[in-house]
Amino acid sequence: MLTDLGTNFTSKLIENVCKYLQITHLKTTAYRPQTNGALERFHRTLKDLLSHYIKPNQRDWDEWLPYALAAYASTTHSATGESPFFLLFGRDMDYPYDEIFKPIRVRYDTDINYVSEFVQRMKIAHRNAIANIEKSTQRVHDQFNRKAAPHSLQEGDRVYMYDPSDKAGLNRKLAKRWIGPYRITRLKGVTAHIKGERINLFGSCGKMIPF
């Protein structure tokens, strides 16, 4: 399970639930939404879908949410080559017009025949989806590496960290974006563990500059 650093995900309750259910809980680095890019991209798509239908006052967004989710679930995903609905249920979603035109459906002599074909169909779909996801992931990885700049930070360095968050009651245009300095206590790839007054976390080296 991958989550951000929200207090609802870092609580002792979630820690105990994950331990009891043997769930590996991974956390994103601070101020680095790209770490959870798949979910962030879904939220962006969902907001785009809702924006086309809700009223100007935006108060009816929850009324349109089921339709937006249905549209997303029935649309072929570029990363998997299948729709989320198909990968979950092993068939395409039924639409309201299906009740009018009554498409021809496959009939099975026994439940065993249906289960056997369903399992085989899901195996093929999941195998193809995994292969497509791996290709998509590698493509994104290669694209990121072409743009990524190497860092020269070392353990023990003091750094400023970029803070994009907005503070209540403060003008965002006048906000102080570089906070610190903090001490790097540990490096792990392109992330660094920093420690200072009221802060103790992992962050992206791309969000840090030397003090």
Image (spheres, grey):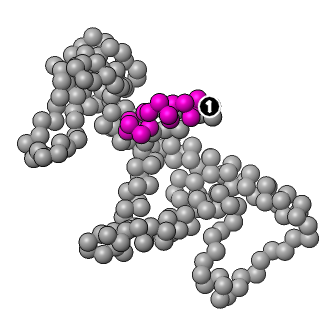
Residue 149 visible at all: no
Viewer-closest of 55 and 52: 55
Q: Residue at x 51, y 47 (%)?
A: 136
Q: Position of residue 91 (x, y in %)?
A: 69, 66
Viewer-closest of 72 and 140: 72
Q: Residue at x 22, y 40 (%)?
A: 164
Three-letter amino acid code at the position of disc 1: Tyr
Asked whether 32 falls inside the magenta stretch, the response is no
56 relative to 115, above or below: below
In the visual, does 101 lie left or right of 189? right
The quadrant holding residue 187 is top left
In the visual, does 166 lie left or right of 36? left
Q: Which residue is mark 1?
A: 20
Asked whether 5 falls inside the magenta stretch, the response is yes
Give the residues drawn in magenta, as a range.
4-20
Please tell me how crowded label 1 is: few (under 14), some (14-19), or many (20+) other residues with Cα within 10 Å: few
